[in-house]
């Protein structure tokens, strides 16, 4: 079973932008005025390329047999046996068996998020004669304790390390780490480039 992790805020914001672009593209085509419309389409195309590659495409996928890392321009497939551990600073850094470090684009750990995580340590729901907050269930308490003092990136880094260690204990042979270019990102870039050229050519 695959588990996909990405920046929820960036992903939602990216799709909001796509909807905005779709509406404006229809409007520009319907009210086409020559070069001004082409310039506007080119600007939308360039901005959409940036939004797609940085907000919509990046993802970290924990599959059964490998870690799939989708960065803006590349996709890396790292079998679990090739992963040694994951460390977290601002980003998650996955250490591979050949001494390479794979930096994950998402999720990241900002200073603000880390400070917020530290403030959660020791926080407990109010308990008294007249409680003002509902009592947490055992599952909610366990989740709160698991995330206490940790950011989303910290938690995911631990999951990656645990999976790698589990495969290492089984003594599985490490398959080669594979990388491929992000064809989708280059396709979006090509469309944006075509719009820029058209905007320059149209009188």
Image: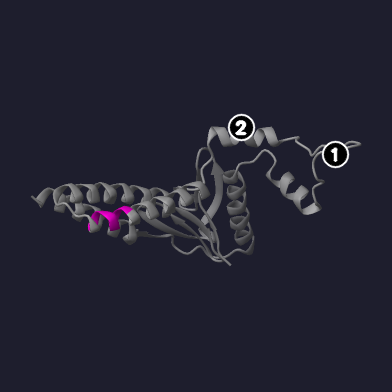
Q: Is residue 28 left or right of residue 123?
A: left
Residue 1: horizontal and vertical position, in percent? 58, 67
Q: Is residue 104 among the parts visible in the rendering?
A: no
> Residue tagged by mark 1?
131
Q: Is residue 78 left or right of residue 179?
A: right
Which of the 4 image quarters holds residue 120? top right
Residue 135: horizontal and vertical position, in percent? 82, 46
Q: Which mark is residue 111?
A: none
In the image, farthest residue toward the front: 31
Q: Is residue 199 left or right of residue 8?
A: left
Q: Residue at x 18, y 51 (%)?
A: 38
Marks 2 and 1, how far apart at CA: 27 Å
Q: Secondary structure at mark 2?
A: helix
Mark 1 crowdedness (10 Å alpha carbons): few <14, some 14-19, many ≥20: few
Quick one: 49 or 70, which is closer to the camera? Answer: 49
Q: Residue at x 64, y 41 (%)?
A: 150
Q: Are marks 2 and 1 in contact (CB under 8 Å)?
A: no
In the image, farthest residue toward the right: 129
The residue segment tinted magenta is 24-29
| Residue 152 is one of the magenta-drawn residues | no
> Residue tagged by mark 2?
115
Q: Is residue 144 among the parts visible in the rendering?
A: yes
Quick one: 13 or 72, which is closer to the camera? Answer: 13
Q: Residue at x 55, y 41 (%)?
A: 88
Q: Residue at x 61, y 42 (%)?
A: 151
Which of the 4 image quarters holds residue 180? bottom left
Q: Secondary structure at mark 1?
A: loop
- Nearer to us of marks 2 and 1 is 1
Quick one: 106 or 11, which is closer to the camera? Answer: 11
**Mark 2 / mark 1, whichever is N-terminal:** 2
């Amino acid at each position: 079973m695959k588990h996909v992790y990405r920046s929820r805020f960036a992903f939602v914001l990216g799709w909001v932008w796509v909807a905005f672009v779709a509406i404006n593209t229809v409007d520009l085509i319907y009210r086409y005025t020559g070069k001004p419309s082409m310039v506007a389409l080119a600007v939308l195309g360039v901005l959409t390329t940036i939004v797609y590659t940085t907000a919509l495409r990046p993802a970290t996928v924990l599959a059964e047999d490998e870690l799939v890392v989708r960065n803006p321009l590349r996709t890396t497939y790292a079998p679990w046996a090739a992963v040694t551990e994951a460390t977290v600073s601002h980003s998650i850094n996955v250490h591979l068996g050949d001494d390479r470090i794979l930096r994950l684009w998402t999720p990241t750990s900002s200073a603000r998020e880390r400070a917020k995580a530290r403030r959660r340590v020791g926080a407990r729901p109010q308990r008294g004669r007249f409680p003002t907050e509902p009592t947490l269930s055992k599952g909610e308490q366990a989740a709160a304790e698991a995330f206490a003092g940790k950011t989303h990136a910290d938690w995911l880094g631990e999951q990656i390390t645990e999976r790698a260690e589990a495969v290492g204990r089984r003594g599985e042979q490490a398959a080669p780490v594979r990388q491929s270019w992000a064809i989708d990102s280059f396709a979006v870039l090509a469309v944006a480039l075509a719009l820029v050229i058209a905007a320059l050519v149209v009188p």
